[in-house]
Image (spheres, rainbow, N blue to C red):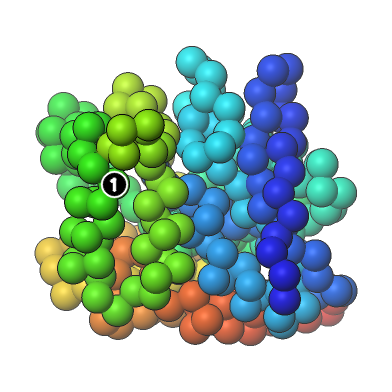
Amino acid sequence: MGDPVTECVAVSPGIELHTRRWRGDDEVPFLLVHGLASNARTWDGVAERLRALGHPVTSVDLRGHGLSAKPDDGYDFASLAGDLQRVLDHLGWESAVVAGQSTGGNLALDLASRAPARVAGAVGVDGGFIELRARWPRWEDCESALAPPALEGTPRSRVAAAMRVAHRDWSAEAIEATLANLEVLADGTVRPWLTRERHLRILRALWEHSPSEVIATLGAPVLLVPADSGDDWSRVKRDEIDRAVAAGRDVRVRWFSPADHDVHVQHPRELGDVLHEWALLVADQRSRS
């Protein structure tokens, strides 16, 4: 199938985002958005499956992440969504399915609300329904619970070994893609591409985001793909998803169970098939309207 084409896309003066692009045929295009402190490579398996099914696909490193620019500002949802819209402009896609994982799912919905003509459908992969304020009404409590771990200075080999133990059913490619969340220094240790301060600024933006309110305003269809990992968080998700479904006009839900939070990394082929089938349904609905 071949490797993706990598390209840097200017989204504002002096700020470029790193993208990975798979050229497709005539099917619905996909823009794939990673989660907080993640990177575009985590979508590679899904992108390859979508490409095999005929879809043009682009994944992107958000600002501050991976190989993209790391400016001091622009870590609010309005700026991040604006970056994605300019990527769509660069690609020449009038509209696309925008699929995001975790925080990226909420961001996909946010983009659909800000630029409705550009989003044919919005997908949240274990995201898009996250309402942190319902669980932590005080920002300080959310910050304390979800602050990033201190990884700087840890040998890459140790992080890789821990990841393989924690995710025994992940492929070697999935492990390597996830390790790309981290910059490897000359001494073999790592540090997150996304700094702690910028991480917390995006987390604060997520805490302030209310997807059920956003979904209520959307004309575009929404697909939520939650992961049931059998923990307390999975039980919270069900309440969040119920609110989202009740608020939206066209919200479908496809659970993966059992599954990790990184469904796109753990089950790329299966998720690609789900996204393909839903995108064809969306395209058919649009052609009939």
User: Does 272 sit above or below residue 164?
Assistant: below
Question: Neighbour class for label 1 at 10 Å: few (<14), some, many (≥20)?
Answer: many
Residue nearer the viewer, 38 or 288: 38
> Mark 1 = which residue?
156
Is residue 52 toward the left or the right of residue 230 in the image? right
Observer able to see residue 120: no
Residue nearer the viewer, 267 or 151: 151
User: Does 267 sit above or below residue 11?
Assistant: below
Residue at the spot x=69%, y=18% of the render? 14
Observer able to see residue 75: yes
Q: Quadrant of the C terminus?
A: bottom right
Residue at the spot x=82%, y=48% of the render? 91
At label 1, which amino acid type do we have? Arg
User: Does 47 sit above or below residue 212?
Assistant: below
How far from the left and from the top, in percent, is residue 15? 66, 23
Q: Quadrant of residue 175?
A: bottom left
